[in-house]
Image (tube, rainbow, N blue to C red):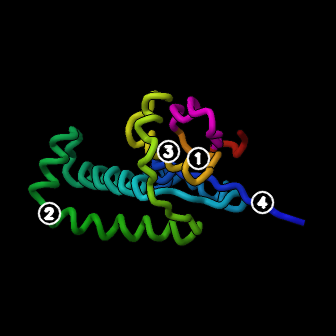
Amino acid sequence: MSYTIDILFIDSNVFVKFFVEGENCFERVHRKYLLATSCNVLEEVAYILLKFKVIDETGRIKHYEILNFLQSNPESIKAFAKEIEKDIENIIENYKIILLYPHFEGFMEMMKKYGLLPNDALIAATCKYYSIKKIATFDDDFRRVDFLEVIKLNDNRK
């Protein structure tokens, strides 16, 4: 008897939904799939969480106001980074999420073929490289990628 386990790639918006809105999508899928994500996804999650911390602390909401605040306040970055690091490490450890290195080869092809933004194209290229066929995301752009199946997280059905 042989067993196969599907790998489910976790997009950044799933992490953000967990950290910002408190919706635990990981709980719905971690027993059914082996979870994986990539370094670029975690970088994007960290940046988004950093922006939310600045908004909460300062009330600034414009992109360049947030950047100016961060560039002028490296101590805030240090403090926020400690919180963000702990949060991200906990979720990776709790759900045994495999961390993949992004695969750059073919990401421009993904942009041209599927009309994806650069980071999404990098995710698609990474999934293709690692033969991952399923992705957990709230981003409908991945529905255009013919080798990826978008897994709905709101009711755990395709």
For disc 4, the neighbor class at 10 Å (few under 14, some 14 to 19, many from 20) is: few
Label 1: which residue? 136
Inter-mark Cα distance, 4 to 2 = 47 Å
The residue under label 4 is which amino acid type?
Answer: Thr
Percent of width and height locating residue 30: 66, 60
Label 3: which residue? 125
- First in sequence, mark 1 or 3: give its number: 3
Q: In the depicted view, which residue is nearer to us: 141 or 78?
A: 141
- First in sequence, mark 2 or 1: give its number: 2
Q: In the depicted view, which residue is nearer to us: 27 or 132?
A: 132
Identify the residue shown where x is 44% and y is 46%. 105
Q: With 155 as the anchor, is 113 left or right in this view?
A: left
Q: With 95 as the anchor, is 112 left or right in this view?
A: left
Q: In the depicted view, which residue is nearer to us: 115 or 68?
A: 115
Residues in magenta, as a range:
139-152
User: Which numbered mark, 1 or 3, is in the foreground of this view?
Assistant: 3
Q: Is mark 1 on a helix, strand or loop?
A: strand
Residue 4's disc number: 4
Inter-mark Cα distance, 4 to 1 = 19 Å
- First in sequence, mark 4 or 1: give its number: 4
